[in-house]
Image (cartoon, rainbow, N blue to C red):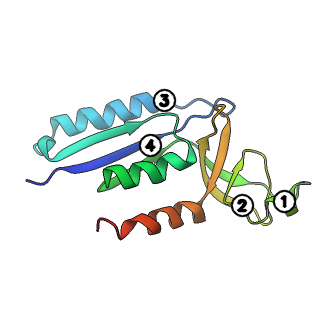
Amino acid sequence: MKRHTILFLVANPTELSPLALDAEARAIQIELERSGYRDGFDLQTRWAVQPLDLLRELCRLKPTVVHVSGHGGRRPAGAAEHNRLRYRDVGADGETADPPVPGRFFQSADGRAQLVTARALQDTFGAVAGSWL
């Protein structure tokens, strides 16, 4: 039987409200172990995920399922750095773009929130999908 890799990516930046992501990972692991198909899955967890970790782990593990857990949100519109950030897909929490851009908060090297836009996530999955599908 083919083993399916589940990639569980976790980001819980320090300045955002804490989430019980360890309990979520534990619950997933327990349910996999209790299932009749436990030998068919390999749960790989990655903690304090930074934006480039997604691309690296997709290329390395070629997972069947990717679960990103943490805070979602939007980069607000109308701040002073508007022009500099207009075409960026990755930015620190609080940086702005016009209009507001939805995404997921990953962690920066210093543990703070770094928004990765939905478009950047889509492009990342699209770039690697053909390499193992």
| Residue pointed to by mark 4 | 9
Do the CB atoms of the residues marked 1 and 3 lie less than 8 Å apart? no
Structural distance between the alpha carbons of marks 3 and 2: 30 Å
Structural distance between the alpha carbons of marks 4 and 3: 14 Å
| Residue pointed to by mark 3 | 20
- What secondary structure is marked by label 1? helix
- Between disc 2 and disc 4, the foreground one is 2
Q: Is residue 34 above or below residue 133?
A: above
Q: Residues within 10 Å of mark 2 (few under 14, many from 20)?
A: few
- What secondary structure is marked by label 2? loop
Do the CB atoms of the residues marked 1 and 2 lie less than 8 Å apart? yes
Do the CB atoms of the residues marked 4 and 1 lie less than 8 Å apart? no
Nearer-N-terminus badge (4/3): 4
| Residue pointed to by mark 2 | 88
Q: Which mark is residue 84?
A: 1
Measuring 16% from the left and 35% from the top, which residue is drawn there?
34
